[in-house]
Amino acid sequence: MGCEIERKFLVDLARWQKPEKGVRIKQGYLVRHEGLSLRLRLADDKAFLTIKGASKGISRSEFEYEIPPEDLDAMFEEFGSGKYISKVRYYEQVGDHRWEIDIFEGANTGLAVAEIELKHEDEVFEMPSWVTEEVSDDPRYRNAYLVEKPYSEW
């Protein structure tokens, strides 16, 4: 079974130096309720279907499958709500861990979130100087929430 153990932090953009290349992401949800989400994501030219379970602390089950981009388009069209988020994801290596930094666009412009995936919940990691407040336990910063209640509406 796939398991995601992830911590999230806000990013101080004044202290972070954006790399030259990022991955453009568009994602939406086919199903989103407590304990289950079915996500569609287009990352540059690759498409994915992801199934996520309920969060237990900073852990939850996760299964991700690459699908043909034309299938993603058809699923968005037939089953999607028409709502999605867009962002650019950058990667930074800090110590032994790779951080993902998401710079949101559209109705979520102004939001920058860094995520780190861990092997276990109490794993020690190096904290970059450009992260600020931890938001791992705040559901407002979950992408599925941002689709329905964008950052600009808070």
Image: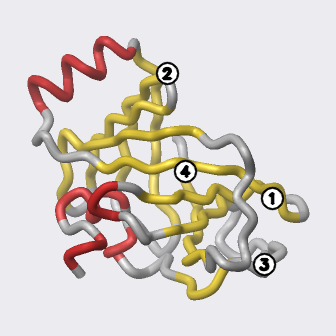
Indicate left or right for 112 with 116 as reference: left
First in residue order: circle 2 vs circle 1: 2
Between residue 19 and residue 99, name the one nearer to us.
19
Label 1 element class: strand
CA gap, disc 4 and disc 2: 25 Å
Q: Residue furthest bottom?
A: 133
Give residue 3's mark: 4
- The amino acid type found where label 4 is placed reads Cys
Q: Tell me whether the residue at label 3 lies in contact with that at label 4, contact meaning CB atoms closer than 8 angstroms.
A: no
Question: Closer to the camera: disc 4 or disc 2?
Answer: 2
CA gap, disc 1 and disc 3: 10 Å
* Mark 1 lies on residue: 97
CA gap, disc 1 and disc 4: 17 Å
* Mark 3 lies on residue: 127
- The amino acid type found where label 3 is placed reads Met
In this view, 79 is above or below 120: above
CA gap, disc 3 and disc 4: 22 Å
